[in-house]
Amino acid sequence: MDFQKFKILKDEIEKLPNVKFESLLGESVLITNKKNQSSFEVPFTTEADGSYTLHLGKAKQVVEGVITEEEQFEANVRKFKNSIKLIFENYDEGIKAVKNCFATFPNIEIKSEFTHNKKTITFEERMDILCNSENEVVKSINSKFRKQISEMHRERKDFAQLFVFFNEDNSIKNHDFNFEKLRAAYNEAYAFQKKFNDHLKKIGDFHKRVETIVLDKELANAIVADINFMENAKISIPKAVVKAKNTFTEAKLKVTDVSRKIIALYQEMFKSGEAEDKIYNLEIPPNDALYPQFLKFSTGKYSREDVQTLEHELEQSFYVLPNLTDEDLRQIADWRNQAMYMHRTNMISDKIVDEIINEFNKRFAVNSSADYSNGDKDLGFKKISDQAMNNGSGIADMSGEVETIKDLEIGKSDEFAMEDDEDFEKQKDAVIA
């Protein structure tokens, strides 16, 4: 037996939820589903780079699982639900399936552990709440971007499911799984996203420091808004300052002096007279079919017009949202600046746009309705930058309706300290590293 191969496969597999590595059988591995103790022989191939691809779709079950009362009950529930759905597709077959359920289901007492006392809501129900919020800005933003928010939610779940070997009914899944390639793809996307996120934060800091130069908030907003970050700073900044002077005719603005100071600031902060973001066009991870959708920097989910709309909505929120603190104002300004920058450069990160909307919801969607005062319905959105760049603890706690894998990691990042809403069981030792 190749001990090195054994150790690598064992270490990789046992980091995953509900999977126990049993043994290496030539070019197959024997694994056990911890939930019901069923075992499968899964063939694998060794790739040119030395990584291993497990072919779950070619797995053979060698030990049947133990079906618990709860699992049988849940299987019966699923069967009954499917028979009801069938009525709307094929009435005769559906009625036959329902009758079969009544004829074959055992007479059982529904035990308390099979029931759920907590009232929970689904992701779609939560979106309904946001899209009908009493807060007009929250309602407007979520209504306009509901489709994109839902797509991001689905892609996040799809990516997470690549690390789950078993279906809800404990059957094995059918996708190929290569831990090293997924980790490499994640780390590539993570590094790129972090670089872009850091650059956006610099733009925000740049904006604030421009305000200290011109000593006028509105004037600073106008200048930064008109800087073409894809153009040489020595050209784009003077043009923006001249335009601002022509707009704010009452401002005592010395174009040459102010331009010189802003150019010096720009060169100091970005270490160049050219916009750093030009390199991003060459570094966006490839949009090939094998690259997980969730890891792609941008898939066109949010258009340039969408980001401009978000920028406008955030600008309006300054005037619409009540009782804003100084911290609220600064945060909204940062989000608006990020949206403005992505609009002007057409460099649009799906995750960052999603982060802005989710963080806006988290901060301002709370109202007096029972849906928000009920802890079981707490939105629980997690900030993407906290997850991917720093110390996030999960993607989203969808109101307690799901169990989670708290410590799932990929590489050195915490983005997948997974907390998703249907598919994971709590597994404290499930760590991908």
Image: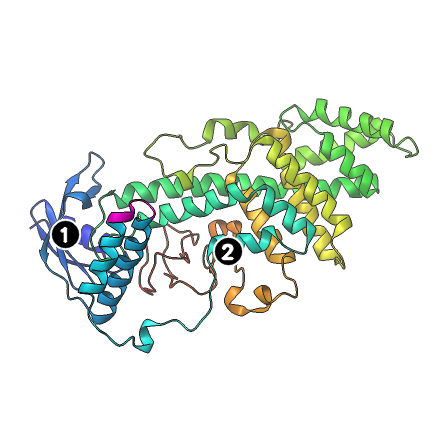
The residue shown at (46%, 33%) is 299
For badge 1, the amino acid type reads Phe
Image side of residue 99 versus residue 313, left or right = left
The image quadrant that residue 261 belongs to is top right
Q: Is residue 121 visible?
A: yes
For badge 2, the amino acid type reads Glu
Which secondary structure lies at badge 2?
helix
Residue 283: where, in percent of width, then height?
46, 30
- Between the residue at mark 1 and the residue at mark 2, the CA separation in whole angstroms equals 46 Å
Residue 349: where, in percent of width, then height?
53, 38
Name above or below for residue 257 compared with residue 65: above
User: Dot 1: within a 10 Å radius of its alpha carbon, few (fewer than 14), some, or many (20 or more) residues?
Assistant: some
Instruction: Name the residue that disc number 1 marks.
Output: 6
Foreground residue among 126 and 393: 126
Q: Most prominent secondary structure in the magenta stretch?
A: loop
Residue 114: where, in percent of width, then height?
32, 72
> Which circle's residue, 1 or 2, is located before the other in the chain?
1
Q: Which residues are magenta?
A: 88-92
Instruction: Name the residue that disc number 2 marks.
Output: 125
Which secondary structure lies at badge 1?
helix
Q: Is 91 covered by the magenta stretch?
A: yes
Image side of residue 2 versus residue 122, left or right = left
Name above or below for residue 24 compared with residue 209: below
